[in-house]
Amino acid sequence: MALMGETITQIVIPVAALIGMGFALLQWFLVSMVKVSNDVSPGSNESLLEDEEENVDGHGAVIKCAEIQNAISEGATSFLFTEYKYLGIFMAVFGAIIFIFLGSVKGFSTESEPCTYSKDRFCKPALANAVFSTIAFLLGALTSVLSGFLGMKIATYANARTTLEARKGVGKAFITAFRSGAVMGFLLAASGLLVLYISINLFGIYYGDDWEGLYESITGYGLGGSSMALFGRVGGGIYTKAADVGADLVGKVERNIPEDDPRNPAVIADNVGDNVGDIAGMGSDLFGSYAESSCAALFVASISSFGINHDFSAMSYPLIVSSMGIVVCLLTTLFATDFFEIKTVEQIEPSLKRQLLISTILMTVGIAIVSYIALPTSFTLYNFGAEKSVKNWHLFFCVAIGLWAGLIIGYTTEYYTSNAYSPVQDVADSCRTGAATNVIFGLALGYKSVIIPIFAIAVAIYVSFSLAAIYGIAVSALGMLSTIATGLAIDAYGPISDNAGGIAEMAGMSHKIRERTDALDAAGNTTAAIGKGFAIGSAALVSLALFGAFVSRAGIKTVDVLTPKVFIGLLVGAMLPYWFSAMTMKSVGSAALKMVEEVRRQFNTIPGLMEGRAKPDYATCVKISTDASLKEMIPPGALVMLTPLIAGTFFGVETLAGVLAGSLISGVQVAISASNTGGAWDNAKKYIEAGVSEHARSLGPKGSDCHKAAVIGDTIGDPLKDTSGPSLNILIKLMAVESLVFAPFFAAHGGLLFKWL
């Protein structure tokens, strides 16, 4: 037995979640100390800042910042409420589908039946699995929606505060932006853990000793989380990139005005999009990864010796790892906000990178402690029908290798997307000869950036599977996500800094303030790319663990790629990421086309707009982005949600296994390449604009032919890095968890087409 008993486990998990929530509230309180209101009197200390040295009205800037912040917050809230109305309908319909499909496995029988893995024991009826899987799906969906919405509210609350703090220095602005990101990171990690813990205990009241049925129904939690994340990512991505592309093409390329210039009609829609796409979408996305990796590990453990012996502490190992992660991330955050002070622009990016390294080192120690006290010294795990004997230190290595693989992916992503290193500088240099060479260099960089992450994932998979079978892969994915609070903090920091820069430009603040917010934003672009790298890497491990759980639950003995049923599934599955990317990129393109036409129309028809004497019509551009994203997110979402249902029902579990394997293998490559290509193009443009080095100054200034070529590359990269790329990781894991949830139905009634033939 483990050193850590059931009673201690039942206390530790909710206490860790509550500590995370308490820390998030503390960070929010500290951010709220920065005032954004009309209460600041012209003679107060708040207005006696560096702006006044350059004859900028400090009091007027505060009022202007408050107005812009309100406009962005209202636009983002309005969009999300409209999106959630559509998603509410989807939740109801798909919840009914889960209930009908799973309930029909045994004809809605209420009789107990032999367990799937322990035939000598009786488990709860299939109808119970249908009911509780549906409830778990709805809980996961609601938690995902709440995670995204709270993240967006926090980001829109913090963006103007970051702008105002930039007047006091870059260090103050950095702390405000980072603390705001930490609010989102800790709220999401803590709420995801707490809801999952409460669900397990409440479901356990009915299931009792039937842990197999209990944890099978809990997999619906991951499905709910990821299905909301898909629509949030796709819808938000289309919204933000339609506005961004429209604003850049007309404003920067055609009219030669600065980014976020208040004369640009698409500028408010662009800033709203940063919040609904990069904040709400990413929040839901990483919550989905966390929920699925936890559910995959719990399900596999429930059919191993943990579940058979009813060892609650060992069974809850994934949740205890996540609890330790919250404590570790709390300590790590203090290094960014309290222990080290940012004084210069050059210190921003190293400070954010240090967060990754510190959290990884501390978490390695944390995993060793958890593995020692929460697990028996030896136990057996389910391994596709066989039993595998495992030691507790084996699981330590599984979680640790996932954790360190995540760090390698993060640092590799940073190398290929940061303008501090040669790959992005080479892309910037290629702009000398125009947009075509910029595009060629950017694509080559994206393809090359796939190599190291794939090797890191491959090593993690081999070691984890060798040590602890499919459970090893599941906890390895959990290891990569164990520092999710820190990962989300540095990820959310990016869009908050981006918005802060936009507000500084629109409020007419001095050039010095804009330089500081640009420096924060450039570091934020890199951290956003790192966040996407983590999400994609963890999605690969999560979907493989879910794939293994699906194969076990569907009763497939082997997946033989030489059989026609499996091979056609592999081909179709490998094609799906391309089909999905085509749909999302075309959606951004068509929405951006409408945006470009509207921005051009306003510049041509509103007298005095270019001279700054008239105000643009921001509302029309916001409406174009909103309408386009809500309409265009449905077809890609339907493709992902319907594929497993169609493949499993009509072609059977072997073909579906092929589809899942194919989509995993090609989806990871395309996702990493797309995200890094877009990130590199974005930072190549910022490298030229900042003009920090002699090389960068030789390529500039803003408005030069070289800069315009860089803007075109950035515009092409926008849908790659913020719509298609990050949505693909949801595609591969969502199809896997959906297949696992519906596995009992597919095993009983699937393959209709082959039965008829």
Image (spheres, rainbow, N blue to C red):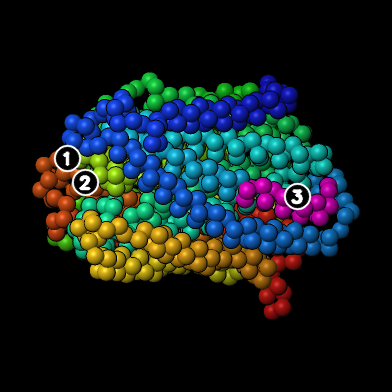
CA distance separating discs 1 and 2:
8 Å
Query: Which residue carries the number 2 mark?
Result: 687
Any magenta on residue 632?
Answer: no
Answer whether labels 1 and 2 touch (C-beta < 8 Å). yes
Query: Which residue carries the number 3 mark?
Result: 132
Question: Where's residue 642, x and y in %?
Answer: 60, 66
Answer whether labels 3 and 1 touch (C-beta < 8 Å). no
Q: Which residue is drawn at 72% across and 39% down?
A: 200
* Relative horizontal placement of residue 541, taking residue 599 as reference (left or right): right
Q: Which amino acid does label 1 sit on?
A: Val
Dot label at residue 692: 1
Question: Where's residue 270, x and y in %?
Answer: 36, 54
- Picture layout, residue 226 above or below residue 531: below
Q: What residue type is labelled 3?
A: Phe
Seen from the viewer's position, the closer of residues 550 and 5 is 5
* Relative horizontal placement of residue 490, taking residue 545 as reference (left or right): left
Range of the magenta residues? 123-142
- Quadrant (top left, top right, bottom left, bottom right) of the N terminus: top right
Which circle's residue, 3 or 1, is located before the other in the chain? Answer: 3
CA distance separating discs 3 and 2:
52 Å
Query: Which of the 4 image quarters holds residue 564?
Result: bottom right
- Picture layout, residue 235 above or below residue 495: below
Quick one: SS at disc 1?
A: loop
Residue projecting furthest to the right: 111
Any magenta on residue 134?
Answer: yes
Which circle's residue, 1 or 2, is located before the other in the chain? Answer: 2
